Image: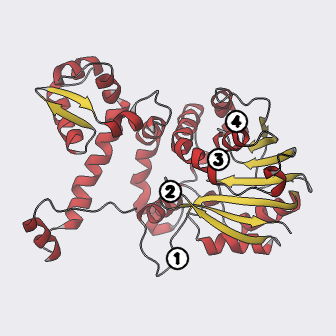
Amino acid sequence: MQLTISPDNPLEWIALRANMVPVPLLHAQIMPVISKAVLEAADKGVFDAVAEGHITTDAIAQHCKLNPKATGELLGLLTALDYFEYHDGRFTLTRMARKWTLKHEPESVYGMMLFNNRVMWPWLDKLGTYLETGEGIHYHDHLNPEQWNYYQQAMVAASGSEAKEFGRRAPVPKALRREQRTQMLDIGGSHGQHSVALCKRYAGLASTIIDLPAAIEQAAPLLARLGMGDRVRHVPGNALTDDFGEAQYDLVLMSSLAHHFTPDQNRDVARRVAQALKPGGIYIVNEFIRPETGASPELVGSSTDLFYGLTSTAGNYSIAEIQSWQRDADLRTGKVVTYRTMPGRAMVIGAKP
């Protein structure tokens, strides 16, 4: 997926083709304002205020305790971005905004917007230092309990839509398809949405989620609301040091965790996963993918690669790199499933002979 600058008329098309439009100025001046405006609107409750019937500028400003002039400027920008429609002095949410921004909508990304505004935004000030030193922030080492809570809400928001597609399309071992009693290990799966999605699809499946104690403390209430307490459970642990056992699991998932680990750490995890898999079991690495050098540019994978490099340990990996860890662990590399609803993301599959 690409975010492109699109002309509105033939003259603008000619200007773009003739390189007369200062594209870097748009990236440098317009897009940061857009990003922060959307985050602040969510944080200040603007989207929910309109959904609740506060539909004029003054009413929205009063309800959200904002300045009316500044609120009008914010609403003008959000209308241009297709979050609102405006008629006769009244704002209404668009279909897109209603689904994705409202706090209590099931697929809303509100939790991610809150985390990005209250926790993540200051990290971007460190990008220049990261480019000079290559040293990331390693944010998991520094989150306080309140920030862990925001982080878990963000992970739920980011995974809601994806987990549904994962549940529908994830390749599974034959034992699972035959509805035999099967066991899954979900490494770093805190909120449990991927485990729950597969357990809903397969009645014979039970999942154990291993994660850091601080993550479990914040994620346990979120998992409880999903209603799978009898088949999905948390176990405190550390993916970098724990022994996962031997021939215990039919399926092992590691989702959105590889980008926090170095190549050697990921290779070691794959080795322990291979030992923990039963014959015929599969290992799914579920990640945003860094495009291969020389491949067509892909905005989501490339931008998350830089972001994860800044904020964590490593960054995104290519499909070839992930498959090399699996092969080094004597797993047979299989199909790669790319997401339809999440550009730049894929399930990379390895199977135990």
Q: Earlier in the sequence, mark 3 or mark 2?
A: 3
Q: Alpha carbon of mark 1 to alpha carbon of mark 3: how far? A: 27 Å
The secondary element bearing badge 2 is classed as: loop
Camera-side mark, 1 or 3:
3
Residue 350 placement (x, y as % from top left): 74, 66
The residue pinned by badge 4 equals 216
The residue pinned by badge 3 equals 167
Q: Is residue 242 visible?
A: no
The residue pinned by badge 2 equals 340
Q: Residue furthest right?
A: 246
Camera-side mark, 4 or 3:
3
Q: Is residue 60 left or right of residue 248?
A: left
Q: Who's the residue at 88% across and 61% down the image?
A: 275
Q: Alpha carbon of mark 3 to alpha carbon of mark 2: how far? A: 13 Å
Q: Who's the residue at 27% across and 20% down the image?
A: 65
Q: Earlier in the sequence, mark 2 or mark 1?
A: 1
Q: Earlier in the sequence, mark 4 or mark 3?
A: 3
Q: Is residue 84 left or right of residue 154?
A: left
Q: Residues within 10 Å of mark 2 (few under 14, many from 20)?
A: few
Q: Residues within 10 Å of mark 1 (few under 14, many from 20)?
A: some
The residue pinned by badge 1 equals 292
Amino acid of disc 4: Ile
Amino acid of disc 3: Gly
Q: Alpha carbon of mark 2 to alpha carbon of mark 1: how far? A: 20 Å
The secondary element bearing badge 4 is classed as: helix
Q: Who's the residue at 32% across and 19% down the image?
A: 52
